[in-house]
Image: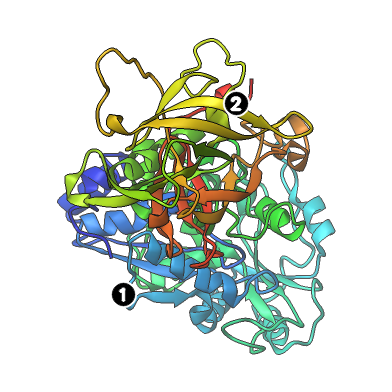
Amino acid sequence: MTDAAELHPSKLHPTNFIRQIIEADLAGGKHNRIATRFPPEPNGYLHIGHAKSIVLNFGLAQDFGGTCNLRFDDTNPHKENLEFVESIKADVRWLGFDWADRLYFASDYFERLYGFAVELIEKGLAYVCELDAEQMRAYRGTLTEPGRESPYRNRSVAENLDLFARMRAGEFPDGSRTLRARIDMASPNINLRDPVLYRIKHGVVHHQTGSAWCLYPTYDYTHPLSDALEGITHSLCTLEFEDHRPLYDWCIDNVSVPSKPRQIEFSRLNLEYTVMSKRRLTELVSESHVQGWDDPRMPTIAGLRRRGYTPAAIRAFCARIGVTKAENLVEMAMLESAIRDDLDAHAPRRMAVLRPLKVVLTNYPEGEGAQLAASNHPKDEAMGSRTLSFGREIYIDRGDFEEVPPKGFKRLVPDGEVRLRNAYVIRCDAVIKDAAGAVVELHCSVDLDTLGKNPEGRKVKGVIHWVSAEHGVPAEVRLYDRLFGVPTPGAGGADYRDEIHASSLQILAGCMLESALRGVQPGERFQFEREGYFVADPDSTPERPVFNLTVGLRDTWGKSQK
């Protein structure tokens, strides 16, 4: 778990309207403690939008000395499974939060929810309806026209109790009957036009209850009553549930629950260059547009973790975007800035040549080498130093040499000099090409008197990174970019899949890393000097590391798209 100081409210979520409501409730004696909950449906992996909710719910509980439950909304078993349950638990823990002994499932309450439904029937507030889904839509009306009452709306209490019991017993096929609330078919709020409370679902094995039930409650019915049973004081949800709040309150007000939570809505996270719909994320995975839920291009927490994001960076991002009721589109640069700031302070520096070009230092003695000292972090002496192996043959990046340099080029050119980072000044004396005219090797001379200094009268403007050819570590590097090439995929009726960025993944198989990266463990993060921030992928092996690009040293997206 994270350090308490790091999770202080000023760091997690500065003052916002929800905090002000809670403060007023506590000060006025409405509550003597607060209880929140994070209620995901286990039908997919969590994404960055869920992270905002996790930080808000767990963070507020922590700030005010309350509790936050983790409760799975497992009322739709056709789409849910234990893989998603376990991934959600792992993500919440990874973000730095703990639900202690307060892990719940909506299915824990199935028997009590059934009892509440019987109570509604006995009060004349619910009835068994035989309209199918299409008929129900036709009867519901529109935003400008009231709905029509179901022909089954005025059944007797006794008949409804009998039919509901037979629904539970499995006598009726799927879709043939539902239990509906008896509220107001003329309500301007369509959610109150006799909404469905229960539907029949045969032939599915629930991951918690097995085959015990063929009758499942809807989310709008289950959620408020689960909150009330758990003693939740503030039920925080996104703005799309604002129109559902009257139904939330109706359910609580009309059955014998032990408490009355308050639902409060806030704006959901909308992030540029990605999609946040679980349906679309599921399609990306099932249609193989990405390589699974933890693909580093996905906005899932698992994908961000594999990409090299840290819990601290995600929490900092959530603090920066704030909590409001105003819908907005958050720039991807804000998320990238949060991880860049965190890794700049904490990631050790290393050298990696992603597109190697061999350099032979012709005046350096064959068979000899040197050990050069290099700092692990230029701003943090406490991170120590490492040793670089130097020898006659090295690799530099192909982008650091130009035979015909453009204006302003400050790296290596024919008959030009450049400094090797943490090492010597070299001069390019000859360019070796293959039969097709491609540059395959450079012959250079090294000035051994230039270690750590610049002799008087010599101006060397360029500094480039390098790796010893003898001691370098072969590696694969995966360059991940934004998954979509437009800020709002699918806008204007476009198929969001047609807007996938074609170069969102480039795999470089022939990279060379400095020897200090030999034996790196998956999950270790580094700044590759002059390249960006990288993390060792779970596919890494001691013999052949695999690194993923987390984020560049600066935001270059706009320039790269021009």
Q: Residue at x 55, y 55 (%)?
A: 475
Quarter of the picture containing the C terminus is top right
Instruction: Identify which residue, 535 or 155, lies in the foreground.
Output: 535
Disc 1 crowd, CA 10 A, few/some/many (<14, 14-19, 20+): few
For label 2, the residue is 560
**Residue 325 position (above or below residue 49):** above
Q: Residue at x 42, y 40 (%)?
A: 364
Relative horizontal placement of residue 439, taking residue 88 as reference (left or right): right
Q: Secondary structure at mark 2?
A: helix
Disc 1, SS: loop
Observer-nearest of 447 and 526: 447
Name the image quarter holding residue 506. Answer: top right
The three-letter amino acid code for the residue at tag 1 is Ala
The image quarter containing residue 216 is bottom right
User: Dot 2 surroundings within 10 Å: few (below 14), some, or many (20 or more)?
Assistant: few
Q: Position of residue 267 (x, y in %)?
A: 47, 41
At which x and y percent is residue 395? 51, 42
Residue drawn at 61 percent across, 20 percent down: 403
Identify residue type, mark 2.
Answer: Ser
Name the spot of residue 440 as percent of width and height, x first.
65, 36
User: Could you tell me how many numbered marks the image carries?
Assistant: 2
Q: Which residue is labeled 1 in the image? A: 100
Do we see residue 282 in this rendering?
A: yes
Question: Split into 4 quadrants, where in the image is the N terminus?
Answer: bottom left
User: In this rendering, does residue 268 appear at all?
Assistant: no
